[in-house]
Image (tube, coloured by chain):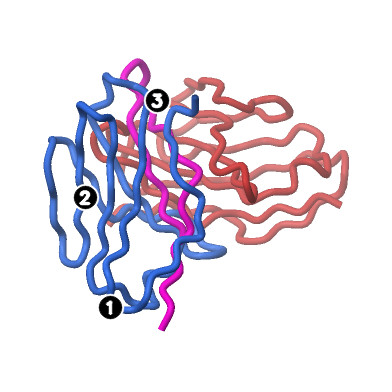
Amino acid sequence: DVKVTQSSRYLVKRTGEKVFLECVQDMDHENMFWYRQDPGLGLRLIYFSYDVKMKEKGDIPEGYSVSREKKERFSLILESASTNQTSMYLCASSLAATEYGYTFGSGTRLTVV
Amino acid sequence: QKEVEQNSGPLSVPEGAIASLNCTYSDRGSQSFFWYRQYSGKSPELIMFIYSNGDKEDGRFTAQLNKASQYVSLLIRDSQPSDSATYLCAVNNSSASKIIFGSGTRLSIRP
């Protein structure tokens, strides 16, 4: 089974801090994705990547950046955390997204105070 | 119009009955359709996918696809309390290599 591992299950950060969320997958998948999920708003795509060093903006990239230096690792960076970035963050990976769907990590619940 | 639409629910179904979850989509070029189950506080888990018109069965789950009408449905037979969750419909975007998710239907199975 594909495993997508997110480094932290719960995280509390202060406003203005730079925050790194890490995601690692172990099945040599090309495609990786970062979502946030909020009540009533569903899953919203932040950034995605189809290959190493490649990134594409999703629907809500403002306030975020990403890094993909190695195929298995896709990091989400909150440049200066704000309270409105308090959310559940979900990483996903896929061999071929449109054919096989995504496998999600267990999520990181981030609280910015 | 949202790209993938689902009734948010909650949908309440008695234990042992059939739960029917529906989804419509706007992209006529979509070829791949997925159903995810998400328990409260957990991440989504892929439970079914379907590519062709008609029905696809897997245990108690049946996915139904009608491309002409642009709808997908998920039937859960012999519903169990453990089926209580939010079900997300997802459809591939034909112009980009990504999947579009609906906002989910909350299903509650009452004993």
Residue B12: which quarter of the image? bottom left
User: Percent x, y for residue B3?
Assistant: 44, 27
Structural distance between the alpha carbons of marks 2 and 3? 29 Å
Structural distance between the alpha carbons of marks 3 and 1? 43 Å
**What's the magenta region?**
B86-111
Q: Nearer the viewer, residue B55 or A107?
A: B55
* Residue A110 in the figure: left or right of residue B59: right
Residue A50's disc number: 3
Q: Amino acid at mark 2?
A: Ala
What residue is at 61 percent from the left and 61 percent from the top? A9
> Among all residues in the image, which is located at the extreme top?
B95
Structural distance between the alpha carbons of marks 1 and 2? 18 Å
Identify whether A93 is placed above or below A66.
below
Query: Which chain wears blue?
Result: B
Q: Nearer the viewer, residue A22 or A97?
A: A97
Upstream in the sequence, badge 1 or badge 2? 1
Task: Tell me the colour chain A is drawn in.
Answer: red
Looking at the image, do the residues carrying marks 3 and 1 touch, with CB atoms under 8 Å apart?
no
- Residue ID for mark 1: B16
What residue is at 42 percent from the left and 48 percent from the top? B88
The subunit carrying tag 3 is: A
Say which of marks 3 and 1 sits in front. Answer: 1
Q: Amino acid at mark 3?
A: Tyr
